[in-house]
Image (cartoon, rainbow, N blue to C red):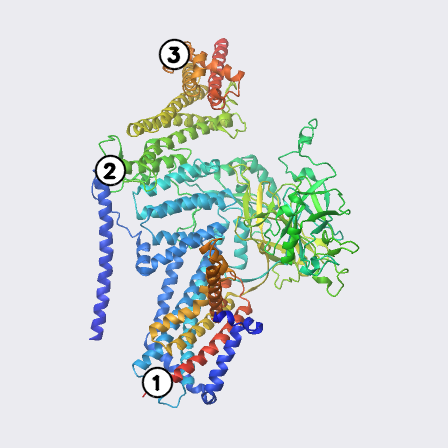
Amino acid sequence: MRNATRAGLVVLLIVAFALTAFTRQFASHARLTTLAGAGGGNAALATSNLSRMNSFALALLLGGLRGPLVMMLWTSSESQKTDRNLEDFDTKVEWIRMLQPEFDSVHIFQVWNKAYNISVQMASLPNKYRVILEALDYANSVDRERPHNINILSAYANVYMDKLGNSTEKDFYRAQVREESRARRPAIVIMLPSSRESELASYLRSAGATADQVLFRPAPREPGKSVLVVKQELAAKVRSSFTGADVTYTERAYTPVPRNAPNWRRTELEPMLDDKGMLLPELLQPRPGMLLKTDRYPGDFYNGAELQFLEEFQPFPYGVSPLALGYNYHKRSQQLLRAGNQRHQQLSNLVIDSRPAIALKLWAEEEWERARRAEIGYFDQRAPKERIDMEMPTASIPVSAINPSRRMYLDEAIYSYDRMGQLAEAARKEYVTHIRGYRTNEMTYVGHIALLEASATLCRADSQFLKGLLAAGEERTRLFREAQQSYAEARAAFDAIILRAYTTDEVLAAVLPSKKPDRAEIGRMNPEQLARTADAVFRLMQQDPNNNALHTEDALEFFTYIARTQARYVLIESTLTDAARVN
Amino acid sequence: MILAAFELPKIVDDHLALWVAGFITAACLLIYGFRDTLRFSLTRAWAISSVCWQESIRRRVLWIIPLAILGVVVVSQLQKAVDPQDVVRQTVKFCVFTTGLIVVVTAIIMACTSLPKEIESRVIFTVVTKPTTRLEIIVGKVIGFARVSGVILLLMGLFTWGYLHVRAWNLNRGIADSLTSPTIEASMIPTLRHYQEFGLLTNRHLEPVDDLQVYSRVPERNDPRRYMFGGVEGEMLVPFYTAPESLIPIGAPPDTPPGAGGLLLELRLGFDVTRSTDVLGERELPPLIANPDAPPPSTQPAASLRKVSVMFLDNNLNTLVDARHFNRGEPIDLTDPTGQRPVYVPLATEGASIIAMQPTFWVRITGLDRDTEYFAAEEPVRMIVPALQGQRPIVLRSIPDPRDTGKSYQETRRRPPTFRSADSRFGQRLRGSATERTSIALFRFRDAKPEEISDGKVTFELRGVIERSGAEAENIDVPTELHIEVAARDSDTVSERIVVNPESARTSYFSVPASFVESGNFDVRLTVRTSGHYLSIQPSSMRMISKREPFALNLLKSLFVLWLLSLLVVIVATFCSTFVSWPIAIVLTLLLLTGRWIVSQLGDATAPGIGPQIAQEMFGAQGDPNAMKLVSTSMEQLARGLNLFAGILPDISTFAAVDTIERGVVMPWSVILQSLTVLGLFGLPMIALAYLFFSFKEVAP
C-alpha cells in the first residue's frame, strides 16, 4: 500500500512537471501569436526550442529562494564592478539573466553595463573589444529566449552603432568587426630561428602589422625556434623578403574553440559573409510564419531574418561595418514598433523610429571616410586622424599613370564612394518616412538630408574621377567631364548649406543680392550666384574670424569640401587640357 | 542600568568567552555531574553513536550526496570564467561551498530532530533504561552525527578531487590550443604559459612584501637621501607618538593644558631641479625650451625657492588638524636645496591641542612644484614645544626605528619616512613614462626565502589596476609595459630587466632568477614605461610564490575545517534540542551560530558613541537634555549588551574553509588551529550544558 502511494506521488509529480512545461509553452506561444497578429501577419510563430530550459529549471529548483538569491547577486556583482574585481562577475550576471529572464529592463541594463562600464575597465583594446562582444553575446542569449523583442534588438543595435561604430576607440572596433564578419581563411604559421625574430618583426611592421600581431612563441618541440601565427594577407607581404633555409610557412586551418568548452569566451564575432562577400543564407532566412506588415508603411515588412535589412546592400567585399549591423537591428526594432505594435521600455517611439535613418547616415559617413583613407593610401601617404583633414591631401595630386601595385586602394575607394551614395539615398528615404510620422525634429533631420545629398554628390564626383583615372580614351574624357559636373553640383549644394544653416539674418542681409535676410532667395539662386554669395561669407569670416554671428568653426568644414571640389575641378581641367595638347 | 553598573575586570572582559566556557564546563561536569563524568565510557558512547549512524542510513540522509553532486555539475556548466584558472577557481568554490552547505544543513536537521523525536516516539525508553548516563547519550549523539558528517565530507571530497582533476585536465588541453591561436591577446600569453607549466590545481604559498615605498630615484646604498617627485605626485609620511604631557612647556603651571603654547615644526628637506625636464613627460616641453625667447612664466618659482604642503593625519590617514591652524594654511617655502638648513613653521594652539588628544599621528609632506624632486635624509621632521622664559624647549622626535631598541631617546635612530605616490581609489598611482624619470615602486621582501625553485627561477604574482589618460591613439593597442628589476640586498646585484604587459585587475606572472631572491632579502623595483598609463598598486599587489602544495592536501585541510564546523553545529543543535521542540531548536541553532556574524553586520550601529549620535538625530541640538541623556545611555547600553551577547557566541568566520582553496592559496595551519580553538571554547560548554538540561528532562516514567 505504501509503495503504491509512493508510485502515485511520483506519477503525480511527473504529470505536474509536464503540465507546467506545457502551460508555459502555451503562454509563450500565445505571446508570440499576439505579436504576429498585431501586425496583421501570419499567426503561427512557434520558436519551440529548449533555450529557456536553464532559466526554467533554475526557477523551478529554487522556488521562493529565487528572489533573495537574485538580490544577493545584484549587490555582489555591482560591488565587484565598483571594486574592479571581475573574476566571477560574468557568472553572476549570467545567473541574474537566468533568474530574471522575463525582465527586459534587467537585460537592457546588463547589455549596456557590459558594453560600457565593464569594457572600459580593461586596459588593452583587444580585451575591451572582447567584453563588448560578451555584451552582444548576452543580448544574443536573451534574443534566443525572447525573439523579436524590441528592447533586446534595440540594445543590440546600440552596442553595434554607438559603442563599436561610434565610440572613442571606433577605428579599432570598426576594423575588427569588418575583418571578423568576413569568411574565415586559414592562418599562416611562420617558423623561424629565435635569433631572427626582430628581423621578421621589422618586415611585418613595415607591412602594416600592429604590435598585437607580432607575438612570437617558442616552437613546441623545436628548441631555438619560434613560431608566429599571422593572417594570410600579412604573410603574403613578407614571404618574398623574409626567407631562409630554416624559415617555413605553413597553412593552418581555422579552428575556433568549441562554444561548449569550459573556458569558452567570445573572442571574435562569428563570420557573417561567404567567400564572395554575400551574407550567409541562414542570416537571411525568414522565421517560419513571421511576417509583420502595416498599411501605414506600405513598403515595409518584417520577416524575422537576423540580417533582413542588410540584404539590399550585398555584397560586402570589405566586411560588414558595425554601423551597418546597428542599422539592421535598429530597423528591426523600428519594424516591431511600426508593425508589431511593441513599445520600448525606456525609449520613446520617436527615438526608436528615427534610429535607422541616423544609423544609415553614420554608415554613409564611415564609407566616405574609408574612401578617403583608401585614396590617401593609393598615394602612399599617412592618413590624418580626422576625416575633415583627409579632404585636401590628395585633391590636387595629378595622376599620369596608375600604379598597378596600389590599384587595390583605388578599387576600394571607388567601392566606398559608390556605397556612400547608395547609403545617402537610403538614409534620405528613411528620414522622409520618419518625418512624416514624427515632426518633432524635422528641422534637424532636414539638415541631415541636405548634408547627405551634398556629400553624396561629392562622393559621386570622386568616384567618377577615380573611374576616369582607370579608364582610357573617350571613356576617360567622358568620366572626367561627368566628375567635373558633379563637383560643380556638390559645390552648389555646400554653398546652399552654408547660406541656409550657418549664417545669421544679419550676415545674410549683408551678402544676398537683395540685401534682405530672405532665405527663400537662396533656393532661387543659380550655382554662380550661390558661389559668389558663399565666397562673400567666407571673406567676412576671414576678416573677422571671432565673430560669433558667422559660425566660422562649423562653416569651415563646408568650405573645406568646397575647396576640394574646386581643386578637383581645376585638376581635371588641366588634365584634359594636357591630354588634348598631347593628342 | 544593570549593564551600566556591571563592569567586568579587564582580564575577564578581554577573554570573556574563555572564562565563561571554563566556568560552565567546570560547573556542569565537575560539580553537578561529577559522578557521571567519572562513569563516562567511550564504548557506550560509541554504541549510541552507532545507533545515530544507522538511523541516518535508514533515513537515507546520504542520498543528499548525489543530489549535491548533480547540483554542482549543473551550476559549474553555467559559469562564465575569465580564464582557465578562473574556471577551476569557481568550480572549487561551488564544490567546497556545496559540501559545507549540505553538511551543515544535514547536521542541523539530524541533531535537532533526533532527541525530540526519540522522546516523542518513546524510543528513548530503550536507551535511558540501560545503564548509560545522560552524558554518554549526549556525547554519543554528537559522535554519531559527526560520523555522518565525516562520511558526507569524505564522499564529497572524493567527488571534488576527481571532478576538478577531470576539469583541469580538459582545460589544460585548451590552454595548449589557445597559445597557438592567432587571436590570443598579448597579456594572456605569460599567464597561460604559467598555467601550462604549473597546472591549474596546485596551491601556492604566497610570500607577502614587508614594505612598499615609491621614490623618484632608486636609493643609493650608502646615501640616506630618498627622493620623491613634486607636483603632488609624491608624498612622505613621518610617524609620531607624543604623550600629552610632553606637549606642556617645561616650567609651565601645573594646570596648563597640553599644547597650550602651540608647537613649532622643524623641517629638513632638500630639493633638486636637475631632472626637471623629464618629469614633465616627453610630449610636453617646458616653455623655455620650446621657446627660449619667451619670458619665464609668472608661476615659475625662484630658483632657490620651492614649496611643500604639510598635513597632520590620524592613524587612518584622515586629516587631523585643519590646514588653517598650521602656517595659516599657506604652503611652506624651502630655501635651502641641500636640506641642511631647517625651516621652522608654527602650529597654532588649536592645532597643538588636537594633537595632544591624539598621541599617534602622521605628518604628511607633499612637494608642490611640478618640476622638482624633493628629498629627505634621516629625521626630516621634528616638533618643538616652545620654551618659557629661562627654560629650554622640548624637542619631540618621530617614532624610533625598531631596529635600534635599547638605546637612549637621543641616540635612537628614527623610523625612516614612508614614501608614497598619490592615492587613487585602488591604491598608490604610478605614472607611466617612456623615459627613465618616472616613479619607482620598491617592494621590499625580508626573510622571504623561496622554498621551491623551478628551473633556477622563482615566480612572482603581480596585480594592479591600470588606468589610461585617454590621450593615446585609439586605433592601435598600446599595451601597458612594466619594467621590473630585482635587487639582491646581500650581494648588491640587480637582475636583468623583466618586461611585463599586464591587464587591469588581473594577475600577471613573471619569473626571476633564483640567485637574486634565494637569500630572502631583496627589493623588487617596478616602473610603468608607457606614457599616459597609470598603475595603481598596494603592498599586496606583489607576491612571491615561495612554494607549492598538492591540491589534495589543501582540500583535506578544507574538509577538516568543515568537519570541525559540522561538529560545532551538531553540538549546538543537540544542546538546543534538549530543552525546546525540534522546530524551535533549528531556529535557535541558526541564531546561536550566526548571531555574532549578524551583530558584526550592524557595524557602526553597535560601536561606542552610537547613543549620543542617535540622541542628537532624534532631538536635534536644542533637545531636552534629560531626554537626550536617557536615549543616549539606553542606546549605549543596548549596543554594549548586544556586543556582549555576540562576544559569547561562536565566531564561525574562523572556519574559513573556502577562501584560500578557492584562490589556489595554501591554507595556513593557523586556520585549523583557530577553528579547533573556537570548537573547544564553545563545544565543550555546550556539551556540558546539554548534559545538564538533559539530566533535568524527564524522558521516561
Cα distance, mark 1 to mark 2? 78 Å
Which mark is nearer the camera, 2 or 3? 3
Q: Chain of mark 2?
A: A
Estimate the x, y position of residue A383 in percent, counting from the top left.
52, 29
Residue at (50% x, 10% y) in the render: A582
Residue of label 3: A525
Estimate the x, y position of residue B226 in percent, counting from the top left.
71, 49
Q: Label 2 is placed on what type of residue? A: Leu
Q: Relative to residue B382, is residue A12 depicted above or below? A: below
The answer to whether residue B402 is left or right of residue A283 is right
Q: Residues within 10 Å of mark 1 (few under 14, many from 20)?
A: few
The answer to whether residue B192 is left or right of residue A262 is right
| Quadrant hosting residue A295 | top left
First-in-chain label (2 vs 3): 2
Q: Label 3 is placed on what type of residue? A: Met
Estimate the x, y position of residue A152 in percent, counting from the top left.
34, 43
Element type at mark 1 = loop
Q: Chain of mark 3?
A: A
Residue of label 1: B698
Q: Label 1 is placed on what type of residue? A: Glu
Q: Nearer the viewer, residue B443 or A443?
A: A443
Residue of label 2: A292
